[in-house]
Every structure is written in C-alpha cells, then in structure tokens.
Amino acid sequence: MELVRPVRTEAIHAVARVSFVLTLSLPGAVPGHAQDRPANTGASTSATSAGKDVPLAPLLGPWMRNESLSEDPLLKTGRMWPGEDATPVLMRKLAEQAAAQLDTVSVRIMEDNLVLLDDRGDVARYPLDGRFQGRGVSGRVIRSHDSVTIETIGADWQRIETFYRDGDRLVLINELRDRRRRSAQFRTVYDRPGRLPGPAPRPGEGTAADGTAIRIVPPQRGRGELLGGKVEVQTLIIDPLIVAVEFFVDGQRVGRARKPPFSTHLQLIDPPREHTLEVRAWNTMGGFAGSDRISLNQLNIPFGVRITRIRGNPTDSFDSARVEAVIFLPRTAALRRVDFHRGQDRVKTVRDFGDQAAAGVARTVIVEADMEYGPADGFVRVTATLADGRSMEDAEILQGADYRSEISVQLVQIQLLVTDRKGNAASGLAPDDFEIREGGRRYRPEALLSARDVPLVLGLAIDSSDSMLRGWSEVREVAANFLDVTLAPDDRAFLVDFDDTVSLRQPLTNDKARLILSIDRLIPFGGTAINDGILFSLLQYGREPGRRALVVVTDGADEHSRSRPEQSADYAARLGLPIYFIELDPTLAGTETKDGWVVTDVSGALRRKKARKRLERISRETGGRLFHVPLTSDDPPWAERIEAVFDQIEEDLRNQYVLTYYSDRPLGVRAEPEVRLVRRGLRLRSAVPLEGIE
C-alpha cells in the first residue's frame, strides 16, 4: 500500500500550453511530488474515473506527429499575423510554444485527470469534466464519447485544443485567440509510433523491426563450433497473440509448438553442414503472424594471414624453399593479390586464385611460392591485399625452418578490458602482458589491438514504460549525448525500445543524427518487459564483427516479458559481449512522518531487489557493470548522476583491447582459450571471444 500527500497544483506562465503541471514521478513518492497511478496503460483499455465510464479509450496511448499531414504552426501563424504589433507578436509566441511540444504526445487517464506528456518530457494534467484555475489562467475540459477539448484562458489570450480520432490517427486542432477573438488555427495529425513512416533505411541497414512478431534465438554452440545431432531451438515471442509456431529446416517442416515457451528439439545431420532454419507463427484467429529465418553452421572468420609451412628443397645448383601460406577471408571480402618477400625483396606476386577469391562465404585460400634459400636472409614475409585495399601480413624466420610440418589453424580474437586496483580502465598494454592457454597448451599472442583499431558495434536499449516518467527528460538527453561522444566514424549502433513489448527503433547505423532522432521520438507508455528487451537486443548483433557492447537503461521491475528470465541470461552468457545496466531506482524506503508522508511498497521493493540481483549476475558474467542510480534526491541533479554513469561506460569502451592468436584447431572445432594477465598491479575484468573482425 502506498499513501501520498494530496497533490498541490501550480499555475503555469501566461503562454504555457497547460494549466496544471504534474511533476514527473515513478512508483515510490518523494516529498513535494505527486504520485499518480495510471488507470489505463493501453489505448484499447476502457478508461474509468470516479466510478463513471470515461469513453476516451480511442485517444489514449503514445502518438507521434505525421509531418506530411500536419500544418506548421509557425509558418501558418506568421502568414496570418504579420507585423510587430501586440497581437501578431502574441500569436507567434503562442504558436512557437505549441510547435516545440507537438512532435510527440502521450494521452492517458490517471485517477480523475486527463494527463498529457509532450515532446519535451513535460507532463500536464487536467480535471475531467471540470474547471481549473491558477495563477493568471483559468479554463475547462469538455469531453464527448470520442473527443476532448481543453480551453485555457490567459489575461489577453485564449487557446482551445481539441483531440479526436480520424480513422487510425489522432488529430489535434489548436486555435489561438487574442482578446478580440481574432484567431489562428492549425491542425496536427499523429500516428501510432509503429506506423509512422521514417527515413528509408540505407543499403545494408535492413528495415525497422517494429512489425517483427517472432525471432529465433540461435541454438547454443561453442565459439566457432558447428551444430549437429540433437539441437534445441528457442524463440522470442513479440506478438502476444501468437498461439502456434512451426519449425522448418531447409524448407521441410520438422516441428510444431502450441504453447509457451514455443521451443522444440531438432535432429540435425551429423557430421554438420549448413542449414536454413525458419519459424512461422500463427495467431489466435488462425492467421499468419510472422516468421524469422537464420542460417546454421555458416562460418565467418576474420581477415588474416598465416605462414603454415616452409619446406626445404636442396638441389645440386642451389638451395631453395617452398613457402605455403593460408589466407583467411570473411564472407564479404574478395582477395586481390598475395605478395611473397624474401628479406626485403619481393620474389613473387600471386593474383589468380580461381573461385576461391570471390566473396560470398567465409573461406581460406592456400597459396605458395618457391624462393632461393640463403642463410644471409633471415626471414620470409607474406602480404595479402583485399579488393577494398586492406592488407595483412605474416613473417617467419627462414633459418632453421626446413621441413616445418603443415598445420591447420584458425585466428582467434578476444575482447579484453583491464583495470587497475581502483577499478579504472587501464591503457598502455602490450601483447607480452598476456598469456593464452588452450587445452593445457600455451599459445603466443599474435597482436593486441586498441579500441582505435577495431570498430565498435554498440547496442542501446531504453525502457520506455510508464514507470520511467520521472527521469525521462534526463535519460533521453544524456543517452543522446552518450552516443554522440562515444561513437567514432567507423563505429555503429542500434536503438531498441522496450515497454510491455519490444521494437527496433533504429537498425544498426553509423549515422549519429538518425540515432539521436530515434531517441527523441521515444514515448514512455505501458508496462515493462526487461527480459524480452535484453534478449531482443542481443539478437540484433547476429554475427556482426568487431568490438561489441550493450547498454540497457531501465527502472528494473519486469512485469510483461513473454520470455523466461533464464533465456536472456543464458543467451547473454553464450554471446559473451559486455552488458552495462543503468538501473534508475525511484524507491524510497521510509516510515510515516509528522506531515503524513509514508512510502511502503514492500512487494515492489522485493521485486526490484530480485531483478537487481539478476541484472548484476548478467553484467558480471559478461564483463559489464550494473550502475544503480537512486532518483530519490535532486542533489546532485539526476542528469548529472546519469551522465556520470554514461561517462564511466564510455571510458570502458574507449579502453577495450582485442587480443589475437592462432589456434591449431581447425575451423568449425570449438576453441576455448583461457587468458591470463601477467602484468602486476592490474586485473583482467573481462575476456570475451569475438566473431570475426572483417
């Protein structure tokens, strides 16, 4: 039970759009703030107030402005009211105020009030079917079965806002009047966020996943390991109306699930080969709800060069050696040439590789060259160059290398984060600071790449549920700044939005402006599905190469996930990328005081504590961190505390390393490296095997 002090309303300034201001709040009230509970969290739910039916359900929910169907308040008002007299200046000022708040709107009923959340994060409430009066303003709310009108009157102006439905859209008519009732009127049209047409995706970016109904959770395997025999396939259900899922392998139906968690076991061919796995979902009406498809056993490898064999070939006239090298080519790479050097001299260039050089699948290309063997020349060097201009090389000492045995190798890459004793990210490391062991055997580090050398793939998942209202403006502003500061030109990021469902607001891109615009368009509404949000975010990485990290911003209380809690935790551990959680905690434990305050939501506090432990475990197992940010005090301001957390994450990402080595296990065979830090005074906080860096 939660008892709160009656709300104290405050009048707004003369040109503000609303008559009463509702201070943003989360469950767990704070002295001086009002605590409101939503009577509705979805547009399809009937609203109730004081025991009476309030037929405003068609208006409820989050809405986003449709630019092509809406009028520009500034442009239209400026044309109607030119000049610098008092009335034109007032009209343009009112229109400017309205224009700044029209991009998004969320309409809901809280207790006996109509509540509006505007684009700036301000929340305003109006008494249903009642009059209001404040400092310098007064007004009334008029509602019918399908519309609501808010009339606000100032000293020398009047504003009339009417909301109504037009088919699938919400329409807002704004009318501005001066004291002589001369007016300007403009129309704003809103779509549901999932329907709003956004900018067309760029080539290779894919399309927005707001319409995604189901996703395949890739079956469990080790790093680089192929799948064969009995395999479990899990799904993430996004559409709550799904009641049946069919499973297909290479076009043939192999299973059907009719109840949660909608998973099955498949019998794959052993020895393994590449397969296409597909799921098709059906809803309660028997209609097709959606599908998803992935490839199994499709290897990808990073670009690399390795001299695998140097074979002596003595003759009567001179000594010679045959040098063989393997070139590792990712799926998207095409090989242009391979140069062989003896000492500083180039002795051969190979340009003809047949079908092996074409892009399309991950593969290895073996090349060889004969060269004169002379003890004065201490080494041979092999350089491979791709069609896009990238090149890599390997070198070996020639002396004493006669009749080296041929080996099959794979290049393994491990993402590292090293800290000092105070927990600060360390820099200035070298390959010799690390020791690599695999199956009891020690391997020499090949290279240590810094964050500047390896592009970052960053995921940002933001909880946009009702309970995030209190810190919403701060979260949105600081998250946008974090992306702007953190992402280098070659880095990419995506944005996931989760409330009681999940959606991909911005697919993977390096366009900061598109990412920030996507954050600005998020609207808090509905419940919370953290497990689904984490799992859905992890699925966005696929087999993307490079450094990876996921940042999740939430208030921590899961209520609506359709996936099992262990699904997101298990997949996070399997994928291995570091996950950073920023938990915004609105709870305030306390007892009743002399002025009547009491905050006692015991069950909510217990749920939050349990959720925090799970998030802490996931972050620890993946090499990330959990940051707990209390929102029960304004000292220091919330924005500063949230920004400080983002700064720590940015420092971690800036000081990541990628350690590489060659394993003698062939491609498709599981490699489980163990990395140790041999440099004193430092701690290896995380060591995560990566997919191939292309």
Image (tube, rainbow, N blue to C red):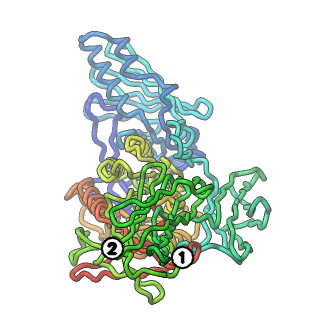
Which residue is more in the foreground, 385 or 458? 385
Tell whether 39 sits left or right of 424: right
Of all residues, the one furthest to the bottom in this rendering is 440
The image position of residue 540, as x and y in percent, is 52, 57
Of all residues, the one furthest to the front in this rendering is 317
Q: Is residue 606 visible?
A: no
User: What is the spatial separation of the Cα atoms under label 2 and label 1, in whole angstroms?
Assistant: 24 Å
Residue type, numbered disc 1: Ser
| Disc ID at residue 335 | none
Which residue is more in the foreground, 111 or 444? 444
Pointer 2 with pointer 1, Cβ within 8 A: no
Which residue is more in the foreground, 459 or 581? 459
Q: Residue at x 71, y 71 (%)?
A: 264
For disc 1, the marked residue is: 408
Tell whether 326 sits left or right of 294: left
Q: Above or below — where is 85 with respect to 172? A: above
Q: Above or below — where is 355 with respect to 19? A: below
For disc 2, the marked residue is: 378
Select label 2 or label 1 by which is in front: 2
Asked where in the image residue 658 lies, by quadrant, the reply is: bottom left
Residue type, numbered disc 2: Gly
What kind of element bears circle 1?
Answer: loop
Q: Is residue 353 visible?
A: yes
Rate crowding at label 1 as few (under 14), some (14 to 19) or many (20 or more) other CA atoms within 10 Å. Answer: few
Which residue is more in the foreground, 575 or 618? 575
